[in-house]
Image (cartoon, rainbow, N blue to C red):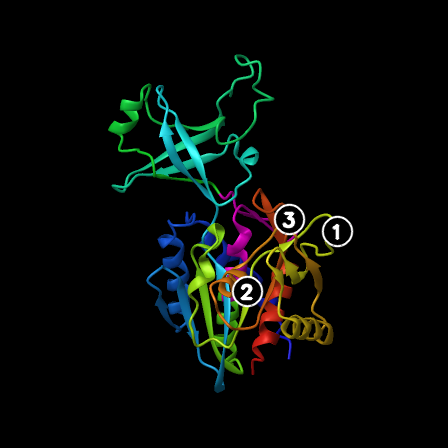
């Protein structure tokens, strides 16, 4: 039976905003994990954390001979201080794969190892049209961009006196906005939009007094953007459904108003039987979906396979436009994703 998730439109948007408001580039995810854990525990679910930092939420089922896993990731793209220039600017290195040209002019926060937080702006090293001839043409890359710190500094020694040093995280603003027309606009919808969907599914289960058919574990991973988030799933899982962003673009059919079912990505095809089951569930229950192949994509499910896990896996997610840049999805895509997750769990 397909859920009516329409009453949960505000819930999923609020959960998304709660997660998106927490800076959490890979390796610096504690705030986002705590936010997700507090939401899950507030709904009455038991949780645990792995030594690596993944958060798992335990969902008892009606039957116990099988255990299914679902995952999303709460780590995001980000930056780190690489070095400090002689005049006090912070040179950067990428954490994950942000599109650096989209960061020119973005506000950011710099987190020091001793707990201080400073603000700044990410800029080209030729930032002034009235000064530099190449202000509009200089490449926007790691060699040509830096952070201007919002403190009175003019030397590397001034920056060091603030406690800022190489290895400090630089987190840029998500700029989250929900429009009256139903769009959710923000950086890092990959994958906090899907994490919000899974948290909302937990609330629906609790509100309706329902259980999934089988015992389930929902895991929020914290190193997906750097390629090893899914390497440590529970050994007790019998299959895995990754819930990550759906791709939109050339040769792809998915829109922001749909749930995407991925048949194959850069790591190869997903489990044929699971993908077919997801397609059939969507078709039979009127879920708005698309099936696509992602040539420039990998997921926590692929990492689980490469780490030696012997379990079938599939990948779905709401269609997200402009991935790794200024992203956008729509309520209808979130709705379709939650509907398909509910059908997959066979809740009653």
How many C-alpha atoms fall within 10 Å of the one at disc 3: few (<14), some, or many (≥20)? Answer: many
Classify residue 95 as left or right of residue 267.
left
What is the number of the mark on residue 251? 1
Q: Is residue 181 magenta?
A: yes
Mark 3, secondary structure of its residue: loop
* Mark 1 or 2, nearer chain start: 2
Residue 34, quarter of the rendered image = bottom left
Q: CA distance from mark 2 to mark 3?
A: 19 Å
**Residue 244, horizontal then vertical, whole percent:** 56, 59
Classify residue 315 as left or right of residue 251.
left
Residue occupying image coordinates x 39% and y 52%: 29
Mark 1, secondary structure of its residue: loop
Q: CA distance from mark 1 to mark 2?
A: 22 Å
Seen in the picture, residue 213 relative to 317 is either above or below; the reply is: below
**Residue 113, horizontal then vertical, whole percent:** 28, 41
Region rendered in magenta: 174-198
Seen in the picture, residue 279 relative to 298 is either above or below; the reply is: below
| Residue at the disc numbered 3 | 321
* Mark 2 or 3, nearer chain start: 2
Whether residue 290 is visible: yes
| Residue at the disc numbered 2 | 242
Whether residue 11 is visible: no
């Amino acid at each position: 039976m397909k859920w009516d998730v329409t009453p949960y439109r505000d819930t999923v948007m609020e959960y998304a905003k709660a997660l998106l408001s927490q800076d959490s580039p890979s390796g610096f995810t504690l705030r986002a994990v705590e936010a997700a854990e507090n939401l899950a525990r507030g709904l009455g679910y038991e949780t645990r954390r792995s030594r690596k930092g993944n958060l798992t939420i335990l969902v008892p089922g009606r039957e116990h001979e099988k255990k299914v896993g679902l995952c999303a990731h709460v780590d995001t793209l980000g930056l780190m201080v690489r070095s400090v220039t002689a005049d006090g600017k912070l040179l950067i290195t990428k954490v994950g794969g942000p599109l650096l040209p989209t960061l020119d002019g973005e506000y950011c926060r710099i987190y020091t190892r001793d707990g201080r937080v400073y603000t700044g702006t990410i800029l080209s090293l030729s930032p002034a049209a009235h000064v530099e001839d190449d202000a509009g043409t200089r490449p926007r890359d790691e060699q040509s961009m830096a952070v201007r710190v919002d403190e009175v500094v003019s030397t590397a020694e001034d920056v060091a006196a603030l406690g800022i040093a190489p290895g400090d995280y630089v987190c840029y603003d998500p700029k989250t906005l929900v429009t009256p027309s139903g769009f959710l606009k923000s950086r890092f919808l990959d994958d906090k939009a899907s994490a919000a969907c899974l948290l909302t599914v937990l609330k629906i289960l609790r509100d309706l007094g329902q259980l999934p058919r089988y015992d389930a574990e929902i895991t929020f991973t914290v190193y997906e953007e750097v390629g090893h988030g899914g390497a440590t799933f529970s050994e007790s899982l019998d299959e895995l459904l990754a819930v990550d962003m759906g791709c939109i673009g050339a040769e792809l059919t998915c829109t922001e108003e749909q749930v995407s079912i991925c048949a194959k990505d850069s790591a190869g095809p997903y489990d044929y039987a699971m993908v077919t089951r997801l397609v059939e569930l969507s078709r039979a229950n009127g879920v708005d979906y698309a099936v696509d192949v992602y040539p420039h994509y990998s997921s926590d499910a692929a990492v689980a396979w490469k780490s030696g896990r012997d379990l079938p896996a599939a990948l779905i997610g709401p269609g997200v436009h402009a991935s790794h840049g200024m992203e956008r999805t729509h309520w209808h895509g979130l709705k379709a994703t939650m509907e398909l997750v509910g059908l997959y769990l066979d809740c009653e």
